[in-house]
Image (tube, rainbow, N blue to C red):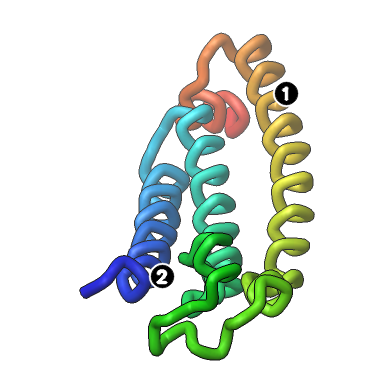
Amino acid sequence: MSLETLFQPMCFLTAAGLVVVGLYAVIFMDNLLKKIIGVTLISDGVNLVLITGGFNKIVAIISPEQAENGVTSVIYEGLKEYPEFAAQAAYPLPSALVLTSIVISVSIFAIMLAIAIKLYNHYNSMSCSVIFKEVDE
């Protein structure tokens, strides 16, 4: 198998791994910082799914020199000029969605860290069980 055929499935597997590890951290970890890192991993996994969905595997792995000389492979025979390659290289909507998601997730990450610092200053612990135990009383 070639790199072109394995790239997209490996990206989806990596994204699934990120989401699974993030869910494990959010559900089963007791430390508040580990939960915050888990939420970030879930966000990164979703971003990777969106980027991989917008990836055009037919034309993405090709050098500009090949495009200038004319592509000889059967897979790339529809691409004879570089402007056509540039137009077909990636879909713009997933890239725009991921860029927006990154900006939003960075601001949410900063807010979560600020809340975690305030909770640590108040309860002197990052353990969720200690924080919720004192809240219940």
Q: Position of residue 13 (x, y in %)?
A: 34, 64
| Residue 114 tag number | 1
Image point (62%, 71%), residue name: 89
Tag 1: amino acid? Ala
Q: Secondary structure at mark 2?
A: helix
Task: Spot the residue most to the front.
Answer: 69
- Please identify the quadrant where the N terminus is shown: bottom left
Identify which residue, 24 or 51, lies in the foreground.
Answer: 51
Question: What residue type is disc 2 on?
Answer: Gln
Near-viewer residue (65 or 124):
65
Question: In the image, is residue 56 above or below residue 134?
Answer: below
Pinpoint residue 95: horizontal percent, then vertical percent: 70, 62
Q: Which residue is mark 2?
A: 8
Task: Identify the residue shown where x is 48% and y is 83%.
Answer: 76
Binning the other alpha carbons within 10 Å of mark 1 as few (below 14), some (14 to 19) or many (20 upward) gives: few
Q: Earlier in the sequence, mark 1 or mark 2?
A: 2
In the rendered image, the vertical position of residue 102 relative to residue 135, given as above or below: below
Disc sitting over residue 38 in the figure: none
- 28 lies left or right of 86: left
Q: CA distance from mark 1 to mark 2?
A: 37 Å
Front disc: 1 or 2: 2
Q: Quadrant of the C terminus?
A: top right
Q: Nearer the viewer, residue 92 or 38?
A: 92
Q: Is residue 77 above or below residue 100?
A: below
Decide: few, some or many residues near mark 2? Use Cα within 10 Å; few <14, some 14-19, many ≥20.
Answer: some
In the rendering, at what x and y percent does residue 103 appear?
A: 77, 45
Residue drawn at x 75%, y 32% as measured from the top left: 111
